[in-house]
Image (tube, rainbow, N blue to C red):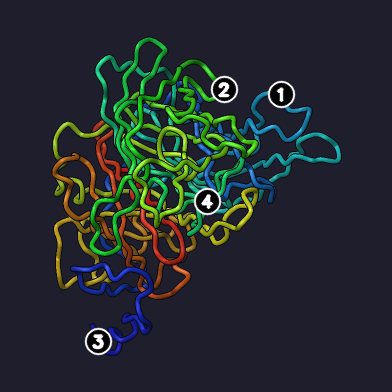
Amino acid sequence: MSERFMQYLRPRKKIVGSTCFGMSLLLFSAIGCSTGSASDPTPSTPQPGPQTYFSPYVAGTTNGGTPLTGAKIYAIDDSATKFSQSTFQLQLPQQQGPQVINTGGFNSGQRGLLSLDITTNYIANSSTGVFDAVPRDSKTGSFAMELAGQAGGLVQLVGQPVSPLVAAVQCPSLKTAQPYLFMTIPAGLTNSPSPPGKLAAAWNPKTDTAYGSVDISTDGSKVTFDNIHQYTLPSASGGQAGVPSQQPSSPAAGACGPTVFGNTITVGQLAVSNPNPGSGDSTPPQASVGIGPTGLLVEYNGAGSASVPFPGTPQSLPSLFYDNTLGAGVGAIGLPKPSSALDSSGLVGSQYLGFVYGAGVYSGNPSVPPTGWSSHLASFGFSGTPSSCASVTTATSTLIYGGDFSNDDPTTSSNGFGNCDLAIDLGPQDPSNNGLFPKAKVWLGTGYSANTTKDTDCFHAVAIAGQLKGKYVIFLLGVDTTQPWAIYLMQSN
């Protein structure tokens, strides 16, 4: 490669954000990677009819330009290749039950990716009191991935952020407590105490939960969440494990049963009395938790949060915010804690499809979506390191290269892999917590479409990983100087 061309690849400005100690600067190109082979798709056995999924609210979701709060219902029919998105958010007096707001079909692409085509969008008309059907022209940017056995997955509709899916087809049966790891689904970045209100639109990485662990057990319809430990993000000065964002709580009790979202678990507040006295918002929020048959956990926090000073909180920190049950932001995504340490070589040596979600910045108004959020399909784990990827002088055994797709269009790729403008170094696995990687680092290359700084950006993160029905999954959360970043990856065919 010529020196002149190498000069083009080098960043011309100072790195924004964390220095990411212990590793050299990565040099990225904006060129798409052409190396790597996609295995022949091996689709799982399709359901005989539509599979219904529970999906939490994610900050940035709108419909017809109107913010759309509340959990969602997705139905994906693998046999008929049709899908729909519904909301239970009451917008009009005439709405009875869930309202379909998007419908369409899909095609199965390389590596098991579903490319969705929205054909009709239903928008609330306040003048007529009905939902108007608005035809949609085909537009790339809508995708879904389903776990083997249709037990869960990820979905992103064009104009909306990625959201996890869980098939809550039955209540869990866990006579022996199952340890879980979970990760917050972030909202817009704020450096102030997270605002109370009916819309969780902000997340403070200095004080709010980033990740944690919990033991879940059941007795009939009763579900107990015990040994709940919640932590902030790792320190920017070396990637150490986070500090507790809340003191270990007493067990939280939930009840599982049929709801419009499936057999989900409804959980009241933890053992915190009068969480926000004198605020007029004394009714504690309720969380909805779905656990799929392969163990995927998805939580929607419900509405609101409250300021709770816990004993022993440093005076230099503001009062911590009580977020219901697990996580902060808008909810949590989790998976069973592996019974033994993960094989890191197998984890980083696999190929993944997933999404990179930039949660943006809190707008200052709980009812307004964060500004600058982004959501893009991405691939990770090339079978061979493409020559156009970054060169790392300090090589590690836990580095995974990846990137987005040009114009969010995977059909332009001949092998199912996208660009090479992102990198994740998982770092060491926590010796006391199988599947936890508290010293992860992320690099956003200059060519990544949502990198607004246009400088190579490096920041610390934390990741959890495990297997769901024999397939690796990786969930990661970090923050740079601009916004929180969440990366959700599922091992692809």
Q: Are marks 4 and 3 in contact (CB under 8 Å)?
A: no
| Viewer-nearest residue: 61 or 236 | 236
Label placed on residue 202: 4
What residue is at 61 percent from the left and 50 percent from the top? 138
Q: CA distance from mark 4 to mark 3?
A: 46 Å
Q: CA distance from mark 1 to mark 2?
A: 12 Å
Badge nearest the viewer, 1 or 3? 1
Badge 3: few (under 14), some or many (20 or more) residues near its Cα, within 10 Å? Answer: few
Badge nearest the viewer, 4 or 3? 4
Badge nearest the viewer, 4 or 2? 4
The residue singled out by tag 1 in the image is: 96
Q: Position of residue 61 (x, y in %)?
A: 58, 47
Tag 4's secondary structure? strand
Q: Are marks 1 and 2 in contact (CB under 8 Å)?
A: no
Q: Quadrant of the C terminus?
A: top left
Q: Which of the 4 image quadrants contains residue 206?
A: bottom left
Vertical placement of 309 versus 316: above or below? above
Vertical placement of 323 versus 365: above or below? above
Q: Residue furthest right?
A: 127
Q: Amino acid at mark 4?
A: Ala
Q: Which of the two discs, 1 and 3, labels the residue nearer the N terminus?
A: 3
Q: Amino acid at mark 3?
A: Ser
- Judged left or right of residue 60, residue 167 is left
Badge 4: few (under 14), some or many (20 or more) residues near its Cα, within 10 Å? Answer: many
- Judged left or right of residue 301, residue 1 is left
| Viewer-nearest residue: 270 or 413 | 270
Q: CA distance from mark 1 to mark 4?
A: 30 Å
Q: Amino acid at mark 1?
A: Gln
Label placed on residue 2: 3
Q: Amino acid at mark 2?
A: Val
Q: Position of residue 259 (x, y in %)?
A: 54, 20
Q: CA distance from mark 2 to mark 3?
A: 60 Å
